Amino acid sequence: MPHDPKDILRQLVEECENPARMIELYYWSGEADLVEVMRQYVALPAAVRAALYAFLMLAKDDPASVNVRIEANGDMTLSSPAADALARRLAKGRADPSFVH
């Protein structure tokens, strides 16, 4: 395994099966705070991470519809019309609850 950063980068590029993904990762690495957010996301308990991921995927087509409410006791609620619609379908037994896991 090479130790020189240039050699490591060269090996990564040569062995990369998906160059477009590597370019995308490089692009995203320049976003302020994204690395820290990803570290925190990965550190979350699996069930919390799965729920957050499910919520983000529900809201992906309309991110501007996401709202946040923070209560005085520290509770934070994220909401979106898509999540509301899924919750209503789950309550009526019309959706597979495994979607949120």
Image (tube, grey):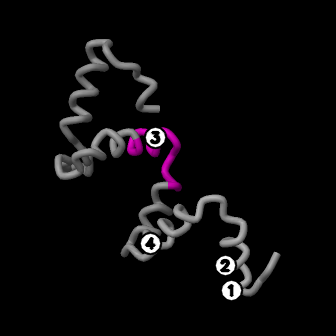
Q: Is residue 7 visible?
A: yes
Label located before the other in sequence (4 or 3)? 4
Mark 1 residue element: helix
The disc label shown at residue 6, or none: 1
Find out whether the residues at labels 2 and 1 contact each other: C-beta distance under 8 Å: yes
Dot 4 and dot 3 residues touching (CB under 8 Å)? no
Q: Position of residue 56 (x, y in %)?
A: 34, 45
* 12 vs 20, nearest the viewer: 20
Residue type, numbered disc 3: Ala
Q: In the picture, residue 80 is in which quadrant?
A: top left
Q: Is residue 71 visible?
A: no
SS class, disc 3: helix
Disc 2 secondary structure class:
helix
What's the distance in space between the residues labelled 2 and 4, CA to CA? Answer: 15 Å
Pointer 2 or 4: first along the chain? 2
Name the residue beneath numbered marker 3: 50
